[in-house]
Image (tube, rainbow, N blue to C red):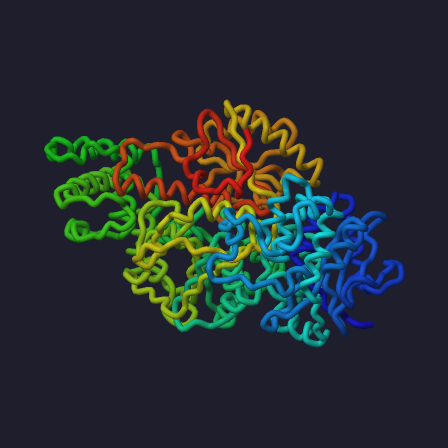
Amino acid sequence: MITYNYTISREFWQDLNRLPNEVAIRTQHILSRMLQNPWSTELHPEKINNAEPGVHSCRADDSYRIIWKHIKPKDIVFCLVDKHDDAYRRAARKSFTLDDGVVKVADVLEVGAKAAGAKGPLFEYARQKDQQFGTLFVGYRDQELLDFGVPLDLLPNVRALDDANQLTNLERLLPANVFNKLVEIALDIVERPSVPDEQLQQSLETYQGGDELCRFVNSEEFQRALKGDMEEWMLFLAPSQRYLSLRDYNGPARVKGVSGSGKTVVALHRARYLAKKALERQGKILFLTYGNRLPGVISHLLEKLAGENAPELRAVECCTIHHWCFRLLSKNGIYPNVNEDALGEILSQAIADNRDKFAELSIWSRPRHFFADEIRIAIKGRAIQSLEEYLALERSGRGTPLRPAERRVVYAIYQAYQAAQKEQGLWEYEDLILEALRLVQAGSLETLYLAAVVDEIQDLTEATLRLVRAIVAPGQNDLFLVGDGLQRIYPGGYSLNRLDIDVTGRSTLLRKNYRNTQEILRAAHALVGNVQFDDLDETADPVPEPEFSLRHGNLPVLHGFNLSDQEIQWIAEEIQRLKASHGYNDSDFAVLYRYRKPYQELITTHLGKNMSLVELQKDPEAYFGEGLKHTTFHSSKGLEFKVVFVVGVTDGSMVPRDDWSLNGEELNDYLAREQRLLYVAMTRARDKLYLTYSRGQSSRYLTNIPKAYIQREK
C-alpha cells in the first residue's frame, strides 16, 4: 500500500473551524480514514470534472464535501470543506501554481493578476477612492451590471475594481449567483495554468508548500493538528520563516516585523532548533519573554511542536526575565520582597524630604509617577551607577529633557528611595535585574547558556539586555532577538548598538501578515500610519507597510453607546448571535479593555450569565482552554483570538485617558504609546474585530481610519 504525504491548506483549516460541531467531528473522522487510504470506496471519492486535473471530493456527511488534490504520485492536499454546491463552486476555481519555485494554491481569478507593488499593495485600492471607474468592468454600462444582479448600493464598489484579484473582496457582500457571473466575466482575461505534478511534488518536499500550505512530517503529526484546534496552526511556517529559524548565524540575529507576521512562531522553531544543538553539547538555551502570561503559552506550544516528552525540551528553559532573576537570587540566598503599595509610600516620603532642599526648582509640579518612571526607566533601566553617569545620560524615550539641576534632584530622591527600600527589605522588579547582573558579573553563574531566544525585546530595558548578553556565551547562534518597535507599549528605550549587540547583516523584517484578515489589518495599520517610532536603532522610523493579508473577512465594527452597561449587554447579545449563525464556541471570543474598572465587573454581570468566563492568567490552560477570555490590552500582547471585542475605546477617559500633568514631548510620547497599545489590542483579532465605546466620543485615534475601512454604528 502506498504511504501518502499529507498537506493542509490554511483555507481548509479555517473551513474546519467554522463547521457546526457535529459536522466538524464527522469531518475529522473522515480525514482519519483518508489517512489510511484516500481512495477507499466507502469514502466515495469523485473527480471534479470542471476543476483542474487531480482535484477530487469525498463526502463529509449528507450536506458537506471535502475537496482535495492528488499530486502524483503520493501527495494529498486538503483544500477546503463546505456545503455541497458551495464546495464544488469553490473547487472549480482552485488552481495549483508555482511562484518562484514555491507551490501556491489560490483561486484561479488570482492567477495572473498583477503582482503587488512596492507602494503599499494592501491599501492601494482604498487610496483610489476618488476614482469613479476601475478597469475590470470598464466595458460594461451601469445598467448591464445591474441586470447581472449587482445590488444598486454595491454598484460603486464593483465599478471601482481594477483587476480580478480585487473581486474576492466583494464575495461576502454579493449574492452567490451574481458573484459567479462576475467571476465568469473576469475569467475571460485569465488562463488556468498547467504545472506538471512532479514540479508541484518537488516544491512540497523542498518548501513545505509555501505560505498557504503545511506538509506534515507524517500522519501522526496531522492527527495531532486535528486534535489541537487553532493552536496547532500557530506552529506552521512559511518557507521564508523556516529559513530564518533553521539557519546558522555568526553572532546575534534579529527578527522584526509587522503585527501578525509570525515572529513568535519563528522564535518557537528557532528555540527547538537551538535546543537540539544544545542537547548534543549537553548544554541549555533560554527562551525569555517579558509578559508573565506568555511563558506558559510558549512552553505549551513548544511541546506541541516537538511532541510530548521530546528530548530537546529538556534543553530549554522558558520563563520571564524576572522569574529567571528570582531563581538566581534565591540560589544565592537572596529572597526579594516586592510590595508595590509600600514602595509608593516610600517614594512619596523621599520626594517630600527633598522638596525643601530644592524648593526653587519647577520640577515639583510633576506628579509622583514621573519620578517613579524616571527612577525605574532612566536610572535603573539603564543600570546607572553614579550621579555623573545620570547627568551624562541621553534620555531616549522619556520625552521632555531634564536640566542638570533637575537631574540632581531626581538622583537625590532616588538615593533616598533606595536607602529606605533597603532598610525595609523591599525590592522593585528592576532591582532584580540589577542584582542578577551584579551576581553574574561576579561569577555566580557557573555555566553560561549556549543561546537565548528573546521575544518582545522592544519592551525590555537596557539593563535587561545587558543581563541577557552576560549569561549567554558569545559565538555562533548566541542571541536570537525578536520584536517590533511599533508594539512598544512601555516608556523608555535603548539601542542595540549601544549594547555592542551587532545584528548588521543578520536582521530581517517580516512584512506578510498571517494572523488578521486584510480588513482588520488595513484598519489597524491606518490607526498608526502617522506614528514615528524608535525601532531600537537610534532612528525615528516610519511605520512599515504590511503586504497583503492572506485572508479576507468583514470590516471591523465600531459601535457607540450611552452607558457602559449597554456596551457590554450588546456584546453579550452579539456573541450569542455569532454563536448561532457562525458556530463559534465561547473559547473563540475575547474581550479586551485598557483599564479593569468598570469592565471586569460588567463582564461578570452581563457575560457570565450564559457562558463561562476566563480572565487570562499565567497558565496556558486559561488561554487554550474553554470559556470566553478577557484581559487588559497589555496582557493580551503576543496572543490571538478568533473574535475580539475591544471595549472602552472612549476618548479622554479610557483610550487615551487624558493626563493633564504632561505636556510637550512627554505628552506626545505618552499619546503615541497609547496609540500603539490600541493597535496591539486590535491586531489580536484573527477573524472579526469589534470596537465599542460609551459615555462620550470614540477615541481620537480612530479618526485616522478612513470611513471605508470600518463599519460605524450607533
Q: Residue at x 30, y 33 (%)?
A: 344
Residue 503 x, y percent position in the rendering: 37, 66
User: Where 382 falls versus 698 (above or below)?
Assistant: below
Residue 86 x, y percent position in the rendering: 77, 50
Q: Where, quadrant-wise, is the N terminus in this rendering?
A: bottom right
User: Where 601 falls versus 240 (above or below)?
Assistant: above
User: Where 114 falls versus 703 (above or below)?
Assistant: below
Q: Residue at x 41, y 68 (%)?
A: 506
Instruction: Report the number of numbered marks.
Output: 0
Residue 137 x, y percent position in the rendering: 64, 54
User: Where 456 falls versus 591 (above or below)?
Assistant: below
**Is 54 left, or right, of 445 in this rendering?**
right
Q: Where, quadrant-wise, is the C terminus in this rendering?
A: top right
Q: Is residue 644 visible?
A: yes
Q: Please name whichever residue, 49 or 515, is drawn nearer the observer in this view of the structure.
A: 49
**Is 592 left, or right, of 192 in this rendering?**
left
Q: Residue at x 40, y 73 (%)?
A: 250
Q: Residue at x 74, y 66 (%)?
A: 76
Which quadrant of the figure has residue 299? bottom right
Which quadrant of the figure has residue 192? bottom right
**Is 286 left, or right, of 493 in this rendering?**
right
Q: Is residue 232 visible?
A: no
Residue 153 x, y percent position in the rendering: 63, 39
Q: Please name whichever residue, 712 or 468, is drawn nearer the observer in this view of the structure.
A: 712
